[in-house]
Amino acid sequence: MSGISRYYAALCQLDQKNPLTREAIKKNTDTMIRLMEQAVLGYKPFHDVRLIVFPEFGHSAPVYPDVSDLLEHLALPSDNEEIQRIAAKAKELGVFVQTGSFLEVDSKWPSLVFNTTLLIDPDGQTILRYRKVNPWIPWEVHASPHDIPNYPDDPLPVVETEIGILGVATCYDWLFPEVCRTLAFKGAEVLIRISAYMDPWGTSEPMNWWDLINRSRAIENTAYVVACNQGASGDHYPPFSWPGGSMACDFDGRVLSKASPGPGEKIVVAPIDIQTLRDERKRRMGHDMRAHHRAELYRVLYAPQFPKGENVSPRTVSQLETLIAQSKKTLEERK
């Protein structure tokens, strides 16, 4: 496996208003393109930035509680004008870009909305599409691939690139260790987190779930973690405030770089050394939890739990509350 073994990742934290229409998304894309240029050109005398990461809902957020309104006002296909603009800039700058997520509609399931992020390569090509598999229920009414019978694509994909094997998961997905573990077992060396992680679970004590989860997933999977969080102020993204704190850590959970906690547009860069990671994975006899994984012990974890979708109708908050209650009942019955 050859490629670029040492480079920098740039986490581009955003603080901008949520658009209410597709036309308004253009302004957010303008900001993202400006930050791409700043990240690459501003740091050029010091670092080779090869990977740029934006946060969840970088393009648009679910400001409407009903799927039909999201479809009418904000949802876009994967190949849309805003992504094309970012892809063109990625090609111009010669970088990989993990786009901020957007609300996606797919003609295969025209009544559903996905929370989707794309990985774009330096040729401007989309090389990975990830749809959030664990929406923040009951509030997020996006569809999960889990909801769709016979979903045809890999819901947890990874991709081999010249800067390492990359995998991405979105915000709440990271509170399920199985998600990142699956990506790591598929070979992921850099785990990318795009997130809109709000207070009080963000970067502040006594919670600080943000640092805790990011560092834990790095340690568990002997992988780099590159995590970009929303920095939107409360008036931009009500009803929550968004603490930023975008960060990267190495395979031992050491924090390599971190934006100061608090809202605001910020760029933070961090070194990624893929060759060192590969050497450590090959060398270690101790603390290689991937190699030590005793899968047979955990079969109870993989029994069906949260009800799978039986059709492709949109979720609603009340329906999700019912499904959560069913899942809690299943837990009690298993004791």
Image: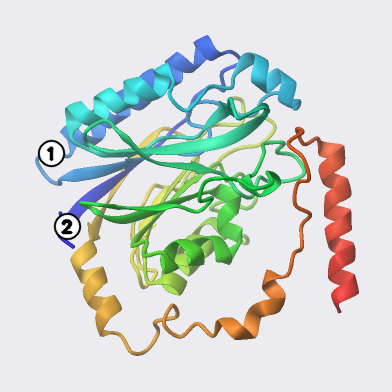
Q: How many marks?
A: 2
Q: Is residue 115 left or right of residue 328?
A: left
**Circle 1: is it few (<14), some (14-19), or many (20+) Cα within 10 Å?**
few
Q: Quadrant of the N terminus?
A: bottom left
**Whether residue 256 can be seen here:** yes
Quadrant housing the C terminus: bottom right
Q: Is residue 191 above or below residue 309?
A: below
Instruction: Give above or below for 172 relative to 206.
Output: above
Query: Which residue matches tag 2?
Result: 6
Residue type at mark 1? Lys
Report crowding for label 2: few under 14, some 14 to 19, many 20 or more residues within 10 A (C-alpha): some
- Residue at position x 54%, y 60% from top? 179
| Residue type, numbered disc 2 | Arg
Residue 169 located left or right of residue 286: right
Of circles 2 and 1, which is in front? 2
SS type, badge 2: strand
Residue 199 seen by the camera? no
171 or 237, which lies in front? 171
Mark before the other along the chain sequence, 2 or 1: 2
Q: Nearer the viewer, residue 103 or 272?
A: 103
- Tag shown at residue 44: 1
SS category of the residue bearing label 1:
loop
Q: Position of residue 258 (x, y in %)?
A: 37, 52
Residue 311 sits in quarter:
top right
Q: Are marks 2 and 1 in contact (CB under 8 Å)?
A: no
- Point out which mark residue 185 bears: none
Residue furthest toward the bottom?
Answer: 285
Percent across and percent down for residue 277 are 26, 70
Distance between mark 2 and mark 1 Cα atoms: 15 Å
**Residue visible at 40% across and 35% down?**
99
- Where is residue 9 drawn, in percent x and y? 28, 48
Corner quadrant of residue 316: top right
